[in-house]
Image (tube, rainbow, N blue to C red):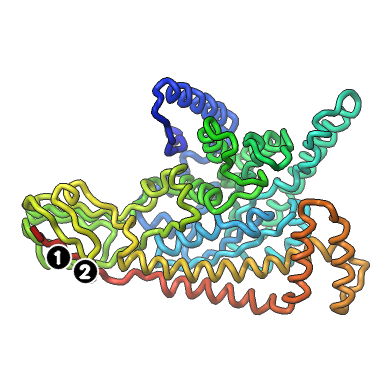
């Protein structure tokens, strides 16, 4: 099977020679990256074909032993847990993914669980496994760890300037750090396999060491993270585990935009934590490895021939087809994906709309003239016969009943994610700030406060000092809410699949002049 390449929306400028140099540079980088990551591409390229189709069977067919390394092949009732560090704890790639599945696969019910802990490592995740992961009885898990395991301080300008024996000792420490990370990752994978959980590894997202930013640059961190990804790809192939790469797409976007804007970063000003647009790229990368282009619906009508094809629709009822008027009703199988204003930049970086957010309406054979398009008696747009013949993407309209329903689904999903985020903040303090001191008294609020104060003061002068101080304060005030937050997140997950059922829509196209 021919390998698929990562499709990218490229922001080429007006200078043709510059375009050519730009494209050549990008292609050279991409080919190099593909060679570095060939393990994962070859390992399950054949199996990807089994999920990349336009039917709901993509979601409903469980993995067999023959295709167990297929990433994120989910079915009704599955429980997917996202294991990670701060990029998962407070990130939105998994929130977007939960929303996409709820909007696109409306006849199944899945559970999504955030198991990220800010500051965590593979070692720390093993320590909390029974209390924070196994308790959810997941059927599927994703793992993205490494940003903290890499020990970024080993790549500080001071350390990078070492020479002689000191430099050799530093190299050995970096090698030992890598070995520890890989050993702990294998241990975590083994725990999940023992519990018969289907695993997908996400390679670590990038540390931006190429952007010109005010934040100190730990040069070499991302080179090491890329090595982590390569080794994990090889291990995934050996273990028949799915793997999805974040390094290549994020690096490619940086490569393209930093050429003319050196301070651009797909990650952000701290070089580590992607914002909403960066997380959208990660979300798109997950979809890209699971599906081919998948339209919500393709509605094609030929008024001259009185013929039609309403793909992606149920309960179809054609009321009128003529050269001047079309009327039909149907119930869509899925809903459009609403992209927030904070995510809009990502639409310039990845072809999400083209690949995964098309609700196409095309009408040919109409008389020359202007037409009114209404859905459920709401005026959506005025279009001429040429525009209708070419086709319009109804998913791009924010005034349709389908889009408004999608916003309602998103609102529930956002509430679910927020409840989980509040719970993660509480658990982060327990696992990262209290567990390291088993000898300390935890029998009273005062004793807990003293332990947290001691822990926080160890980070005084560090960039994360204020963050830890706020986390400790939040824990003292809200730790008692943890059971209620867990229950609330579960209830909102259930509600997500109550509000996501597409309503029937009535579409009218009539000539106005």
Camera-side residue: 344 or 443? 344
Q: Is residue 100 left or right of residue 146?
A: left
At 39% from the left and 66% from the top, the residue drawn is 406
Residue of label 1: 327
Q: Contact, CB < 8 Å: mark 1 with mark 2? A: yes
At 12% from the left and 62% from the top, the residue drawn is 510
The quarter in which the N terminus is drawn is top left
Image location of residue 33, percent across then percent down: 56, 30
Instruction: Establish if 127 lies above or below 486.
Output: above
Q: Is residue 55 left or right of residue 323?
A: right
The quarter in which the C terminus is drawn is bottom left
Q: Which mark is residue 506?
A: 2
Image location of residue 490, percent across then percent down: 57, 74
Q: Is residue 96 left or right of residue 130?
A: left
Task: Answer with mark 1 or mark 2, whichever residue precedes in sequence.
Answer: 1
Instruction: Establish if 338 lies above or below 66.
Output: below
At 86% from the left and 25% from the top, the residue drawn is 163
Task: Check disc 1: other Cα within 10 Å, few if <14, some if 14-19, many if 20+.
Answer: some
């Amino acid at each position: 099977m021919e390998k698929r390449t990562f499709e990218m929306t490229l922001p080429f400028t007006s200078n043709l020679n510059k375009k050519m140099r730009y494209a050549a540079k990008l292609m050279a980088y991409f080919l190099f990256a593909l060679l570095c990551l060939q393990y994962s591409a070859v390992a399950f390229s054949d199996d990807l074909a089994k999920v990349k189709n336009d039917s709901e069977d993509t979601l409903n067919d469980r993995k067999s032993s023959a295709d167990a390394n297929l990433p994120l092949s989910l079915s009704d009732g599955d429980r997917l847990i996202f294991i990670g560090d701060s990029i998962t704890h407070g990130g939105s790639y998994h929130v977007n993914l939960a929303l996409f599945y709820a909007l696109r696969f409306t006849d199944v019910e899945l559970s999504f669980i955030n198991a990220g802990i800010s500051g965590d490592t593979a070692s720390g995740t093993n320590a909390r496994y029974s209390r924070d992961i196994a308790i959810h009885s997941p059927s599927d898990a994703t793992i993205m760890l490494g940003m903290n395991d890499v020990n970024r301080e080993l790549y500080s300008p001071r350390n990078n300037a070492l020479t002689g024996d000191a430099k050799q000792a530093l190299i050995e420490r970096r090698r030992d750090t890598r070995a520890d990370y890989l050993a702990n990752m294998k241990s975590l994978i083994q725990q999940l396999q023992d519990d018969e959980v289907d695993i997908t590894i996400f390679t670590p997202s990038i540390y931006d060491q190429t952007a010109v930013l005010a934040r100190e640059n730990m040069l070499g961190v991302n080179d090491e993270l890329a090595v982590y990804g390569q080794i994990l790809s090889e291990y995934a192939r050996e273990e028949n585990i799915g793997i999805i790469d974040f390094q290549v797409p994020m690096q490619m976007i940086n490569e393209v935009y930093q050429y003319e804007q050196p301070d651009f970063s797909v990650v952000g000003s701290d070089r580590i934590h992607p914002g909403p647009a960066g997380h959208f790229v990660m979300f798109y990368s997950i979809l890209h490895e699971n599906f081919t282009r998948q339209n919500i619906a393709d509605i094609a009508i030929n008024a001259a021939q009185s013929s039609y094809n309403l793909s992606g629709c149920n309960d179809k009822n054609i009321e009128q087809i003529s050269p001047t008027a079309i009327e039909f009703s149907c119930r869509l199988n899925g809903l459009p994906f609403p992209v927030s204003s904070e995510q809009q930049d990502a639409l310039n970086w990845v072809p999400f709309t083209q690949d995964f957010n098309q609700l196409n309406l095309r009408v040919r054979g109409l008389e020359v003239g202007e037409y009114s398009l209404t859905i459920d008696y709401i005026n959506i747009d005025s279009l001429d016969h040429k525009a209708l013949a070419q086709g319009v993407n109804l998913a791009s309209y924010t005034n349709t009943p389908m889009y408004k329903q999608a916003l309602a689904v998103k609102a529930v999903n956002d509430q679910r994610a927020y409840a989980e985020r509040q719970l993660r903040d509480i658990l982060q303090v327990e696992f990262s700030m209290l567990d390291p001191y088993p000898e300390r008294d935890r029998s009273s609020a005062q004793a807990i406060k003293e332990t947290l104060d001691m822990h926080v003061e160890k980070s005084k002068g560090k960039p994360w000092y204020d963050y830890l101080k706020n986390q400790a304060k939040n824990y003292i005030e809200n730790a008692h809410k943890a059971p209620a937050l867990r229950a609330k997140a579960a209830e909102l997950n259930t509600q997500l699949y109550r509000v996501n059922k597409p309503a029937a829509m009535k579409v009218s196209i009539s000539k106005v002049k």
